[in-house]
Image (spheres, rainbow, N blue to C red):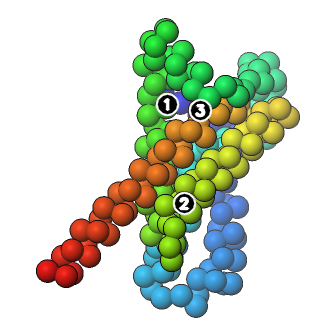
């Protein structure tokens, strides 16, 4: 399982940054919305912040933490689609890494569901696909930049883009199935 650094010198969470972001969004957009929309958007924000926190933090802010990153972690990335997955599944079976791929799918299922729930209009599938991919790309690019600058121990992995996006699509499919069942019940 993923090990998170903690203790003196590590910023463990971005929670204090999320509150003003949500407050601004609430003030400019949400306060005019229905109660249902407020709840749906709030759930999406909370979940998005949790995913962001899990994938970006902790950050080394103290000298000993920065020294640890500089000496114990090297800058790494994977740009070959499914390379790590194939290596870890078919060549040198490593359940730990397969579990990480599985979790990359699982973590984005609720995200895809919640995004589909707040979207209006047609082409929800395409929108969820693009939003899931875009959010994952932002996460991975931040990991790349912060890793390059010695601010993080994460790596850029194109496989994460693939598996997170698949999770978002599965979340959309769950939303569509539930919505279809609700529509059938309404008409019967």
State the SS at label 1: helix
* Residue 89 pos. (x, y %): 46, 17
Is mark 3 in CB contact (under 8 Å) with mark 1? no
- In this rendered view, identify the residue nearer to me: 44 or 23: 44
Q: Which residue is mark 1?
A: 100
Is mark 2 in CB contact (under 8 Å) with mark 1? no
Please identify the quarter of the rendering in which residue 153 is found: top right
* Residue 82 pos. (x, y %): 57, 26
Q: Residue at x 58, y 87 (%)?
A: 31
Label 3 packing within 10 angstroms: few (<14), some (14-19), many (20+): some
The vertical placement of 147 against 19, above or below, is: above
* Residue 32 pos. (x, y %): 58, 91
Q: Which residue is mark 3?
A: 159
Observer able to see residue 82: yes
State the SS at label 2: helix
- In this rendered view, identify the residue nearer to me: 12 or 52: 52
State the SS at label 3: helix
Q: Which residue is mark 2?
A: 126
First in sequence: mark 2 vs mark 3 = 2
Q: CA distance from mark 3 to mark 1?
A: 11 Å
Q: CA distance from mark 2 to mark 1?
A: 26 Å
Please identify the quarter of the rendering in which residue 61 is found: top right
The vertical placement of 70 against 91, above or below, is: below
The vertical placement of 26 against 46, above or below, is: below
Label 1 packing within 10 angstroms: few (<14), some (14-19), many (20+): some
The residue mark sitting in front, 2 or 3, is 2
Please identify the quarter of the rendering in which residue 142 is found: top right
First in sequence: mark 3 vs mark 1 = 1
């Amino acid at each position: 399982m993923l090990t998170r650094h903690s203790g003196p010198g590590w910023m463990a969470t971005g929670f204090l940054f999320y509150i003003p972001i949500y407050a601004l969004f609430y003030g400019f957009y949400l306060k005019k919305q229905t109660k249902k929309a407020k709840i749906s958007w709030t759930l999406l924000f909370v979940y998005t912040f949790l995913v962001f926190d899990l994938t970006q933090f902790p950050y080394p802010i103290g000298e000993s933490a920065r020294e640890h990153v500089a000496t114990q972690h090297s800058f790494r990335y994977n740009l070959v689609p499914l390379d790590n997955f194939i290596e870890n599944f078919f060549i040198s079976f490593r359940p730990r890494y397969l579990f990480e791929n599985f979790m990359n799918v699982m973590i984005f299922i609720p995200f895809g569901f919640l995004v589909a729930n707040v979207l209006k209009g047609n082409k929800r599938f395409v929108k969820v696909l693009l939003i899931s991919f875009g959010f994952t790309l932002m996460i991975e690019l931040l990991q790349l930049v912060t890793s390059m600058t010695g601010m993080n121990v994460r790596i850029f992995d194109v496989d994460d883009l693939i598996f997170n996006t698949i999770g978002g699509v599965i979340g959309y499919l769950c939303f569509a199935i539930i919505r279809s069942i609700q529509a059938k019940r309404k008409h019967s």
